[in-house]
Image: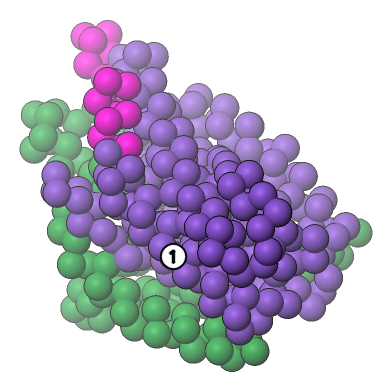
Chain colours: A purple, B green
Amino acid sequence: MHIPEGYLSPSTCLTLTGAMLPVWYRASAKARAGIDAARVPFLAMGAVFSFLIMMFNIPIPDGTTAHAAGGVLLAIVLGPWAAVIAVSVALLIQALLFGDGGVLSFGANALNLAFIMPFTGYYTYRLAAGHAPAGSARRLFAAGLGGYVGLNVAALAAAVQFGLQPLLFTAADGTPLYCPYGLEVTIPAMLLPHLTLAGFAEAAVTALALKYVLKTSPEMLAAGQPGR
Amino acid sequence: MLKRYWLIFLIMALLTPLGLLAEGTAWGEWGPEDLAAMLGFVPKGIDQASSWWQALLPDYSVKGVGEKAGYVISALAGSALVYLAAMAYMKAIARSK
């Protein structure tokens, strides 16, 4: 769901980047105040994990592809604010070096994948896990559910951003200037593959990777993270 | 402890060509040529914006090598850059304390 260059109007890109600025500011302030220097490499490795997992495209029967993004796993392990930074860095390199997602639409993509996804997924996880003990089946299920919900809410956000374009921006002759499809097309087109396939991939990645981290190196979970 | 994770990342990077088995493009990520074929025209904003930024390794491809090798090289180079960029950003905000 990396929105490419030109699919959103410059004003949309500016608005969504503007919405992301206080998020980046808060994430950076949190990291500055609260992160132990020894934990900084964990955050950077989380960014690498997110970058790599997004390369595993899943075939969708309608001929398109989708992928997991790892943002909810990072939120559970590192905390949601650290996940904002980690996923943003992965998205920035994807846009600049690989043309995956536009440079102007970086703020929009960060809003969806580096903010909406980790936060909705993280709070879904917390709600579903309740006070279940660390490493319990319920907690791992909650992590998977968080991954599923987080990815789908992010896909919905991208769909709304895409789908508003032809309503707001058309040329004098009525042809769309940016994304040509309206909400009635973009929402089902984005949600169906994520609800049916990619969401389950995200759920499996989130639960299995969390299980592995808890088993091999529970100290990787940030202090204060539930389920440590 | 971290060594174990780097080994996992290396294995992931070597396995990324599995992600190429999925044919087609993600929804909404078509290039101008695809849009022209689908719609019969390219929306003006997309046409104008699509080429101002020239990515060094567009779509995780490397000139002169095959698709799979290019994808693996992209995975390795991208991982290194993502790691270094994240470390640099965290160091920069720590210094601005």
Queried whether the magenta region covers residue A204, the answer comes back as: no
Q: Residue at x 52, y 50 (%)?
A: A146
Residue drawn at 80 percent across, 66 percent down: A223
Q: Nearer the viewer, residue B68 or A49?
A: A49
Look at mark 1 in the image and give the residue it sits on. A205
Q: Is residue A185 magenta?
A: yes
Q: Residue at x 68, y 64 (%)?
A: A133
Q: Nearer the viewer, residue A125 or A198?
A: A125
Above or below for A16 versus B3: above
Q: Which residues are magenta?
A: A171-191
Q: Please, what secondary structure does the residue beneath circle 1 have? A: helix
Q: In the rendering, at what x and y percent does residue A145 appear?
A: 48, 50
Residue placed most toward the observer, A26 or A219: A219
Tell me if residue B75 can be seen: yes
* x, y percent for residue B83: 59, 73
In the image, A79: left or right of A115? Answer: right
Residue B88 horizontal side relative to residue B81, left or right:
right
Q: Residue furthest right?
A: B97
Q: How many marks?
A: 1
The answer to which image quadrant residue B15 occupies is: bottom left
Residue B47, how many percent across, how many down? 26, 35
> Crowdedness of circle 1 by 10 Å Cα count: few (<14), some, many (20+)?
many
Q: Is residue B92 above or below residue A220?
A: above
Quarter of the image holding residue A76? bottom right
Q: Amino acid at mark 1?
A: Val
Q: The disc numbered 1 marks a residue on which chain?
A: A
Where residue A123 appears, x then y in whole percent?
63, 44
Q: Quadrant of the C terminus of chain A?
A: bottom right
Q: Looking at the image, is A92 positioned above or below residue A123?
A: below
Q: Residue at x 30, y 34 (%)?
A: B46
Name the quarter where the N terminus of chain A is drawn. Answer: top left
Q: Is residue A93 at least partly visible in the picture?
A: no
